Image (cartoon, rainbow, N blue to C red):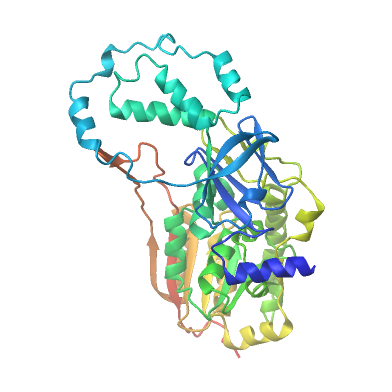
Amino acid sequence: MLQNNKHEEDSNQNPRVTWEGCSVLLDINDGDRLVFARLTAASSLKIGNKNCLLQPLIGCPFGSLFQVENGKEGPFLSPLSIIEGDNVEEKGDCQIKDECKDNRGLVDNNTAQSLTGEDIDEMRRQGATGDKIVQALIANSATFEKKTSFSQEKYRLKKQKKYAPKVLLRRPFTRSICETYFKKYPARIGFLRVDSLSLLLSMANVSAHSDVLLVDMVGGILTGAVAERLGGTGFVCNTYLGVTPYPVDIVRMFNFSSETCRRIVRCSLTDLCSTQNETSVQIGQAGDAIGSQSNEEKSPLCSESMDGTALSSEHGMLDLMPETSTSPVTKACKTPKAGEKASQEAINLWKENGFSSLVIATPDADAWTVVKELLPLLSFSAPFAIYHQYVQPLATCMHNLQLGKMAVGLQISEPWLREYQVLPSRTHPQMQMSSFGGYILSGTRICSDDQPQLK
């Protein structure tokens, strides 16, 4: 227990360096595979057909680059320094030489490489590194010098990913976590793209010392993003319809301190409302069904029957389960649990003053059903923002808010994002990118004669 507290203190002092028990995002071969893992002394990661321990990553700064090497005790992750500007002087000569090169005369018949598989296995037994094997493949290729510089670099990267894979140690925060989930399994976060998430927080005016009311049915990515923006100030109150809270398992990926986790609380709608009518009871029963469905189907991170290999694909794998072996060390280094039940004093304070912001992401529930119950909990002139993957539920909600004169400044926004590839002589939009990022309804709550006022 003392060791766990020590790791928490170290993480609070220097969040740029990893510590034992923290969650990390491992980028293998420049985005070909993304893995969430928890660093412990016994945790390991399988890269290709090699199983490497993650202990060398403990105590390293985020952004460090590692390469898989073969040692006497097996494969291991070796730190790799990034050297820039090696071929700056040769760029001009390469451009001149490329003018007289043409790949149309090259025939891929598997006869250009004179180095056989037995020769490569013999080099490995002799202790040759992955870089030496790649250099040997280049030296024994009969067509390498005839290729253009672009084709040569493509050939070198292909062999490097196979014989000398690299692992980039990334810090999991809102953008990296959202992009990782959206890349391969967007349905698990309600198709919430990173630009939509940032716009959602901005329109809800989520800032320091705010008390934010949340309805998070997207796995916890919204809860973690709000808590990260608050920076350990204010409170994040996750509310739910019924008696079953919605799962927020993604929050544990953020490496929040114990103080930040204590400011992430949960409270049912029944406890927040001073009175409850028959409609609220019916909505609560519907919320129980939605919550149970979310626990069974929309919570892959807490499913013990799902392993990391089941979430892999040949091209661009994304492992959402931490590939770490179970050990006593892993159990002793768990991060503080977020989402405890809110205290009665805090609930009474919110009933009296109201919340400063309202953020809703309910892809599996009707937006208007949720908004009409939660909007009276906001203080007057407080902003709110609602995300949905389809525009029709937000349009219905906007129409009902206008008829009831419950809010002003209502608008539906559709975020749009385009990613560009910027390389020498080839700058263009990405060939494969998402054209859909959902919709956001935003507005400001006002006082109405038909609405119950906070006491």
Residue found 76% across the figure and 66% down from its top: 3
Residue found 67% across the figure and 56% down from its top: 290
Left or right: 314 in relation to 56: left
Image quarter where the N terminus lies is bottom right
Residue in the foreground of this view, choosing between 229 and 56: 56
- Classify residue 415 by image quadrant: bottom left
Q: Position of residue 47 (x, y in %)?
A: 61, 35
Residue in the foreground of this view, choosing between 444 and 174: 174
Left or right: 26 in relation to 265: left
Query: Can I make out residue 399 in this image?
Result: no
Residue in the foreground of this view, choosing between 114 and 428: 114
Number of marks? 0
Q: Position of residue 368 (x, y in %)?
A: 54, 64
Q: Position of residue 26 (x, y in %)?
A: 56, 47
Residue found 65% across the figure and 32% down from its top: 50
Residue found 60% across the figure and 65% down from its top: 215
Q: Is residue 206 above or below residue 47?
A: below
Name the residue furthest bottom: 455
- Classify residue 429 by image quadrant: top left
Q: Is residue 128 above or below residue 293?
A: above
Image quarter where the C terminus lies is bottom right
Query: Can I make out residue 19 in this image?
Result: yes
Residue in the foreground of this view, choosing between 398 and 199: 199
Q: Position of residue 146 (x, y in %)?
A: 29, 18
Name the residue furthest right: 328
Q: Is residue 150 above or below residue 319?
A: above
Q: Is residue 417 above or below residue 242?
A: above
